[in-house]
Structure formats: C-alpha cells, structure tokens
Amino acid sequence: MHESATPGTTTRGSVAPQGGPTVTSPTSEINTKRRALALSVLLIPAALTLFSVTSVNVAMPAVRDALGADAVAQALILTTYTLAFAVVLLPAGQLGDQYGHKRVFIIGVTVFTLANVWCGLAPDFAQLVAGRVLSGMGAGITMTPVAALIQLLYAGPERARPFGLLGAVLGAGSAVGPLLGGMLIQAGGDIGWRLLFLINVPFGIAAIVLAIVLLPANPPRAAKGFDLVGVLLFTGALVGITLPFSMGSALQPGNLAMLATGIVLFVLFVWWGRRRDRRGQFTAVAPRVLAGRALRTGMVVSFLGFGAFTSSFLFLALLWQDALGHGAFEAGLVVLPFAIGSTIGAAYSGRLVKRFGARVVTVGLTMMVVGLITVGLMVLANNAALLTLITTALPLLVIGLGVGLFVGPLTTASFTETEGRDAGVASAMLTSSQRCGTAVGIGLLAALYASLPGGSQSLSGQAIIAFVTAAFALAALLVMAFRRPSGMDQLGA
C-alpha cells in the first residue's frame, strides 16, 4: 500500500489514513452532531445529481409527446446531462484543491439549482437540452468536492461508513428517480415532467444555506496555475468518446470520425501532462495521480458498472411503458425493490469492506450480473404474463443489493494509493469515469432501441437490451476479479 510522506498522526487533526487519500482533517475539532449534519449537506445534493438522471428516463415518453422529440433528441436529453457532468469534473477538482472544496461545492449547487429552473420552464426541445447541459455542469461541480470534503470530516478507517452512506444515497437517488418521476407524471399530466426538474429547487436552496454554515473550509493553496490546454484536451476527449453513442449508430462515418478524434485527443492529453510534468510545470492531472493501479482499476470498473446499472433504469422504464403498456407510475414502482436492495447493501457495505476489503465489490458486481441476466431471460421468454411487479421483484432486489455493495466500497478502494494533495483531481477522475459510463450506456441503449426491429415496443428487442446491460456488469466483474491490485484488499486488513 502507498505510504504518505508523513505516515500516521502527526499533529492534532492531521492524519495519513490507511483507507484513502491523505487530507488535513479537522475531525477532532468538529463535534459528532455537527459532523453528521455536514455529511447530510453533502449527501442530499449528491443524491439529486443521480435523481436527475434516472427520473428523466421514466419521463421520456411524456417529454417525447410534449415536445415532439425523436429518438436522437431523446438520447441528447439524457446524455448531454451526464456528458456535461463529466467534462467539468477535472477543472472543478483542480479549483477545489487550490481554492477550497467548500467554495466549489456551493458554486456547483447554485448552478445546478438555477439550471433546473430553466429545465422546468423550457418551452421547447432546444432549451430543455441547453438547460440539461447547464444542469449537468452544476451537478459535476457539486459532486467533485464531495469525496474530498468527506475526507476533511472523517479520518482514516472512519471514512468507510460515510463513503458507504454516499453509495447508499447515490443508489437511492437513482432508484427513487423513476418512482417519484412516475408519480409526478401520473398526477401532473403534461406539467408532471416539468415538476421533475422544479422539485430539485427547494432542496438546492436549502443545501446552499446549510453548506455555508456547516461545511469545513480547507485552507486554499497558493495558485500553481491552471492547465487550460490539458483541460481542453480532456474535455474534447470525453466529448469525442461519449457523444457518438448518443447520435444514432456509432458506426456511422461521422460518429466514427468523432470517436477517433476523441481517442487521439486523449492520447495527446496524456502526452501533454507528462511533458509539462517533466518540465516542472503545473498539469491538469499529474502522472503520479494515475500511476497507482488502484485508481486506474477503479476508473475502469466504475465506467463499466455505472454503464450497467444507470442504463438499466432506461431499459426498465421503456420495457414497462412501451413494451408492456403500463403507465409511468407503475414503471416507477417496478424499481422499488432495487431501491430497497441498494439501501440495505450500502448500509452494510462500510462494515463489510473493513473486514473483507475490495472483495465486497466483486460480490456486488456478481449480484448485478446474476440479476440482470435473470431479468433478460424473463423478457426473452416473450410472455408478458411473466413480467409483473411481483415476479421481477427478486431479481431487481438482487441488482440493488449488488449496487449497494459496489459503489461505496469501490470509491474507498480506488483511493488507497492516492496522496492527499491529489484528492480533488483523483476524485474528479473517478467520478468522470462514472459519468462517462452512464453516458455511453444510456446512449448505446438509445441507439439500439432506434435500430432494433420494433424498437422499444418489442419484447425480443428488450431482451437484447437487458443482456447488453448485463454485459457491462460482467466486464466490470472480470476486471475486478482478475486485475484488482492487492493494495485494494488491504482495506480489510
């Protein structure tokens, strides 16, 4: 395992934790109650950022009817949010490390709140997409400092529990999105889908006020500069690699060219960072950040795992509404077992990871694969009578349990070799991989729906979609099972 330059406790409130990046922590000076309140201020906006992904999935038929959006337009409404989320993470991480994570968090929640007002009042498709882009940027700026602020609030082994809770609220936010979205659409008619955005506003305002009062402020560092070229290369790479999956078939010549450009830009981004680092210049992502296998493995597994479970919400929403002919509320209700499972899994993940280390992640991914394949086989039977709220409850509960055991422990394990000075950038890279996985997964599913005979109304086509989501989870499982660095398992030591 990586050892910091000053291992162990050095001064009051200064620690070199064994379970995550080293960050100067005021833990000893924050009473337990205030610390719990501060954690809730971080967790609620974090949940809203994923609620804004999955709630819109179940609303797509209503949005399609209200604004006349075609398949590509619907994919853009879904994926521009996650893409914008991803591209701001790196600069937000840099700014948080240099100027204070608390300040960046408050800015992010403010942008997210204002953007949701725009989305809720959007008169047409173009303005809704523009609002979603701004909302995604606000969500990304909000989420980037969350991990670093948790490290300021909690020291060493104490972090397993709050990271477990983070996994729980992310899973709950994802699962509650379709349920609450279905309720609002069912009750509100055409105005219902607009309420999905406007409901975020009061929570955002409350979070801003409480963050100002409760969150700890890490001392800003002297600015080392801002690697604008590196940020632009990274942004271009993310857009080029993820956007083609939202623009119809990724095999179209224009999309292939965009994908190739994204890969080239990523190679240039790595080269540029190494070049500046050799010259002693500030770089967007120092080579040492990605030198450790733990973070690299965590990024790959996060990309694949989030691609699986977040896109499965789109699959379930369209299966229930388009293929089976149910209403939006029932389409939301179907994911309730998932919400229960993810909450239970995340609640126990903290204590499990202390005992078993990153092996907990492998177990969680196995449960996701089994659950997704089971649902796929049920759909493949091509018998609507087999697909009810009761018959699908058990496999969706298993998927939820798997997600609960996957998100928080993987976050903790990914930081085992990260130095405290790189906490913000490392967090940004990990979260970027999650959002890119979400964008690629949802975009790929939307493209498949558009190309399959019968589209989302065909049960045979829906079965293919189910197995694609399972393939994402299986790939994540194989990486975690066979390429996991041994340092990740020392969490359980």
Image: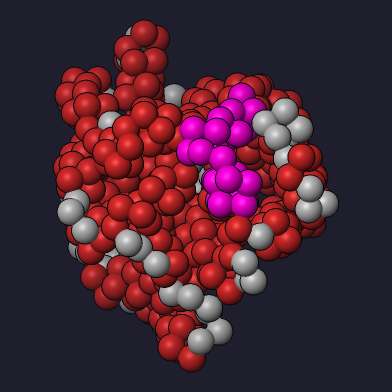
10 with respect to 358 (left or right): left
Give residue 259's position: percent from left, percent from top. 48, 81
Q: Position of residue 129 (x, y in %)?
A: 27, 60
Q: Which residues are magenta?
A: 316-340
Horizontal side of 201 relative to 347 (left or right) equals left
Please say whether residue 257 is one of the residues in the magenta stretch.
no
Colour scheme employed for the rendering of this structure: secondary structure
Residue at the image point whose x is 38% and y is 23% from the top: 39
Residue 262, above or below 215: below
Query: Magenta part mainly helix, strand or loop?
Result: helix
Q: Work out whether residue 382 or residue 151 is closer to the camera in this orientation and state it.
A: 382
321 is within the stretch colored magenta? yes
Q: Would you place residue 236 above or below residue 330 in this image?
A: below
Determine the residue positioned at 26% across, 61% down. 125
Tell me the residue at 73%/45% (across/down). 384
Is residue 398 at all visible to an observer of this figure?
no
Counting from the top left corner in percent of width and height, residue 132 is at 28, 54
x then y, percent, for residue 480:
72, 52
Q: At 47% from the left edge and 44% from the top edge, which residue is drawn? A: 58
Residue 21, placed above or below residue 356: below
